[in-house]
Amino acid sequence: MHLFIFNLSEIALLIILLFVSIGSSLACFFLVQKYCTWLSLRDGGIFGTIFANTMPTLVGFIFAFVTVAAWQNHNAINDSVSKEAHTLFDLYQTLGAYPSETQKIGQEEIIKYSKLVINQEWPTLGQTGFDIETFKQLDRINSLFLNYKPANVSGFALHNEGLRLLSSYRDLRRTRVENANSYIQKPMWGALVVSALFLILFSAFFKTRNIRIHAVMMALVGGSLGVMFFLLTLLDNPFLGPSAIQPIPFEKTLESILIIQK
């Protein structure tokens, strides 16, 4: 079920969530109006106004806070992926100043690693989050740098720069892999669902003269909640769903490397 939702298109996901949220709102409205009339809120004074404004405001703050936090996390990981690809390209260019044998082996290993990231590791991000073969390929690149022994002072300076770039790349890759999971934890999802249910029930308890207008208002409340859940689903896992981060920076890095090689 989890993967089915994330494999949907944006339009399909939005339609399903709107259908579920609006349907739930109208179902709650029907049940409350039919079986809980003795609980209907009829106060049209100041206290009724206060209660009517408090619940939507509180729920709105909760959804706004979580949505903004998930959006910022999504953007931060996207920026980190771009930095990771750029660092890999800088590492490739730095190898151009190494002795010919080390240069050839190292650059070939980076090209192979880039292809593994794009074609093999990326499709598994958000599910396993870790591809052993890609990791082993990175370890081969790491071993190449660690086993290299500079022959002179200028070689030491160059090698230190290569080690620095490699260290930076490993940190960026670790950030990507560790964040390839759900940002909103299950307790938070539970709190959001319960808050949405409370708001729907709260709105259904009011008594209006025109029940059709009340039903339309309930549908609008449900639709608004559906849109919020739609945004949260899109932003929850940075590497799953219709808005998943794609390996475009790595593809551009690989294209640039292949252009340099020609």
Image: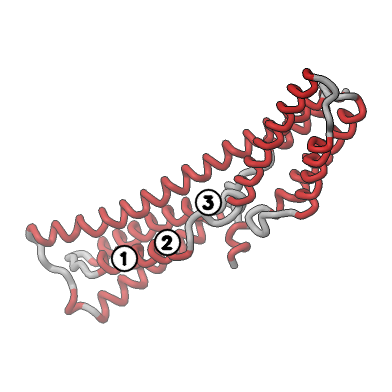
Residue 113, compared with residue 258, is above or below; it is below
- Give the residue number, with chain letter if any, for mark 2: 188
Disc 1 is placed on an element classified as helix
- Kindly report which numbered mark, 1 or 3, lies closer to the viewer in this rendering: 3
Q: Give the distance between the C-alpha atoms of the residues marked 1 and 2, in whole angstroms.
A: 18 Å
Residue 142, compared with residue 93, is above or below; it is below
Q: Give the distance between the C-alpha atoms of the residues marked 3 and 2, in whole angstroms.
A: 16 Å
Q: Position of residue 236 (x, y in %)?
A: 52, 53
Amino acid carrying label 2: it is Met
Front residue of 253/44: it is: 253
Label 3: few (<14), some (14–19) or many (≥20) C-alpha neighbours in 10 Å: many
Q: Mark 1 vs mark 3: which is more N-terminal?
A: 1
Quadrant for the N terminus, please: bottom right
Q: In which image quadrant can residue 150 be found? A: top right
Q: Give the distance between the C-alpha atoms of the residues marked 1 and 3, in whole angstroms.
A: 23 Å
- Kindly report which numbered mark, 3 or 2, lies closer to the viewer in this rendering: 2
Q: Position of residue 146 (x, y in %)?
A: 79, 37
- Residue at 47 percent across and 53 percent down: it is 232
- Residue at 71 percent across and 35 percent down: it is 166
Report if the CB atoms under discs 3 and 2 are less than 8 Å apart: no
Please state the total of marks drawn on the protein image.
Answer: 3
Q: Mark 1 vs mark 2: which is more N-terminal?
A: 2
Disc 2 is placed on an element classified as helix
Amino acid carrying label 1: it is Ile
Report if the CB atoms under discs 1 and 2 are less than 8 Å apart: no
Q: Which mark is residue 200?
A: 1
Q: Which mark is residue 234?
A: 3
Q: Position of residue 179 (x, y in %)?
A: 58, 50
